[in-house]
């Protein structure tokens, strides 16, 4: 082999080795992607979402080690410096997630939530998307359980309203997901525990509408009925909540007999009917005292026909005899239904 030929081959070999080395270095700096195919319709088609494996990063690995050792502040500073210095790195989503983790451990969970937000907004295709969303749910859940925001490092302020907003954002971020279902149910439970029964009833009703096949739907409907019932303030006030609760409980008893037996819904319905009887008697008494015998007679007759076994019924019959004869002879309401159940419109109960 002549000398020029040998030199040319040597140059080609050196250039090839340099190109291979440069390609390997490039692969180490970016996530490695493996293309895959599936056989569909008799033809091989490439998957639209190729599987991805992350390349290791020494600094981020160090941050994870610090988090494992609960050195959260050091991990936070190191991860923040790395993210600021590597704004175009393919591992930046991992850096954001590690910042959120370190802030969560350090106690600044509001800020951790927003770092997860940045990850979710900027890298929706990231494999850390589910983990970041789960961390956001955990933050909201703990704030609802009483975890306090810090002021100069001292836990001082509740953040329950912010937590409800967090759960709402999680639901919008991943609609239809199991996490969105958990977020909605957690919101309803929070309102129930806080005594905000009107919000709780609406949230449970929305849950039952959105997830009719969920195993938690029967319980959600039951809690919604209880929340409606809890809004009833007494026979002197608006009976709409107890009317709604009665219809909901009747529907639950028909759809879930085992649950109805376990919760004693029949006994609850009986107590609700007793409340209706008291309400009717109170309304009729009001009409009698305001010199409206026509309305009083109509309401007394409604009570007697709808709830013949109620304690108020005997008193209603007694007061009916005290009304003018023309009022007693007026036609009464039409009551139809099972075992004397009243199905007349409820404007009589005011």
Image (cartoon, grey):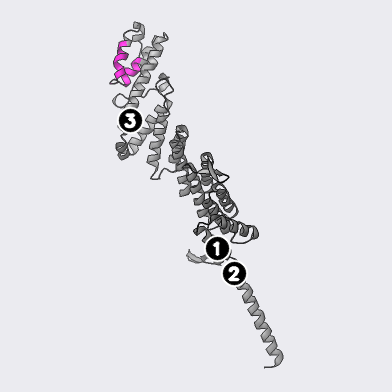
Q: Residue at x 50, y 45 (%)?
A: 140
- Kindly give the residue lying farthest to the bottom in the view shown: 1
Note whether residue 6 is visible.
yes
Q: Can the viewer see residue 93 in this picture?
A: no
Q: Secondary structure at mark 3?
A: helix
Please give the residue where the numbered disc 1 appears in the rendered image: 62
Q: Residue 305: x, y in percent?
A: 31, 19
Q: In the depicted view, which residue is nearer to us: 69 or 144?
A: 69
Q: Is label 1 in a helix, a strand or a loop?
A: helix
Residue 33: x %, y % from top left:
55, 66
Q: Secondary structure at mark 2?
A: helix
Residue found at x 41% / y 19%: 348
Whole-percent x, y for residue 331 in the image: 35, 13
Q: Which residue is mark 3?
A: 268
Where, by quadrant of the figure, is residue 97 drawn? Answer: bottom right
Q: Which callout, 2 or 3, points at the residue further toward the start of the chain?
A: 2
Quadrant showing the N terminus: bottom right
Q: Are marks 2 and 3 in contact (CB under 8 Å)?
A: no
Query: Real-space Cα distance between discs 1 and 2?
Result: 21 Å
The range drawn in magenta is 300-318
Q: First in sequence: mark 1 or mark 2? A: 2
- Mark 1, residues whose alpha carbon is within 10 Å: few (<14), some, or many (≥20)? some
Tag 1 or tag 3, which sits nearer the N-term? 1
User: Of circles 1 and 2, which is in front?
Assistant: 1
Image quadrant in which the C terminus is located:
top left
Read off the residue under disc 2: 27
Q: Is residue 303 covered in magenta?
A: yes
- Is residue 243 within the magenta segment? no
Within 10 Å of disc 2 (Cα), the crowding (few <14, some 14-19, many 20+) is few
Q: Report x, y in % for residue 37.
A: 51, 66
In the rendered structure, the answer to whether residue 107 lies left or right of residue 241 reads right
């Amino acid at each position: 082999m002549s000398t020029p030929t040998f030199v040319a081959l040597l140059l080609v070999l050196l250039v090839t080795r340099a190109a291979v080395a440069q390609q390997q270095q490039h692969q180490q700096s970016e996530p490695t992607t493996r293309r895959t195919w599936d056989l569909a319709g008799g033809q091989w088609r490439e998957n639209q979402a190729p599987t991805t494996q992350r390349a290791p990063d020494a600094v981020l690995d160090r941050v994870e080690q610090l988090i494992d050792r609960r050195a959260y502040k050091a991990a936070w500073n190191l991860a923040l410096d790395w993210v600021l210095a590597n704004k175009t790195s393919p591992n930046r989503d991992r850096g954001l997630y590690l910042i959120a983790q370190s802030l969560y451990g350090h106690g600044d969970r509001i800020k951790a939530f927003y770092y997860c937000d940045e990850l979710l907004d900027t890298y929706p295709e990231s494999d850390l998307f589910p983990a970041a969303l789960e961390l956001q749910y955990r933050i909201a859940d703990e704030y609802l359980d009483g975890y306090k925001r810090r002021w100069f490092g001292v836990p001082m302020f509740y953040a329950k309203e912010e937590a409800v907003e967090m759960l709402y954002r999680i639901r919008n971020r991943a609609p239809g997901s199991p996490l969105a279902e958990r977020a909605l149910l957690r919101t309803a439970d929070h309102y129930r525990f806080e005594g905000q029964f009107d919000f709780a009833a609406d949230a449970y009703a929305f849950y039952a509408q959105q997830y009719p096949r969920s195993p938690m739907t029967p319980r959600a409907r039951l809690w919604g009925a209880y929340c409606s019932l809890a809004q009833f303030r007494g026979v002197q006030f608006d009976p709409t909540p107890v009317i709604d609760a009665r219809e909901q409980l009747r529907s639950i008893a028909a759809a879930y007999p085992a649950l109805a037996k376990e919760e004693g819904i029949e006994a609850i319905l009986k107590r609700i009917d007793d409340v209706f009887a008291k309400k009717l008697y109170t309304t009729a008494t009001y009409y009698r005292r305001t010199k409206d015998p026509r309305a009083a007679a109509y309401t007394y007759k409604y009570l007697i026909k709808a709830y013949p076994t109620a304690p108020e019924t005997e008193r209603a019959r007694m007061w009916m005899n005290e009304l003018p004869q023309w009022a007693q002879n007026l036609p009464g309401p039409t009551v139809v239904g099972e075992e004397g159940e009243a199905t007349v419109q409820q404007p009589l109960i005011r």
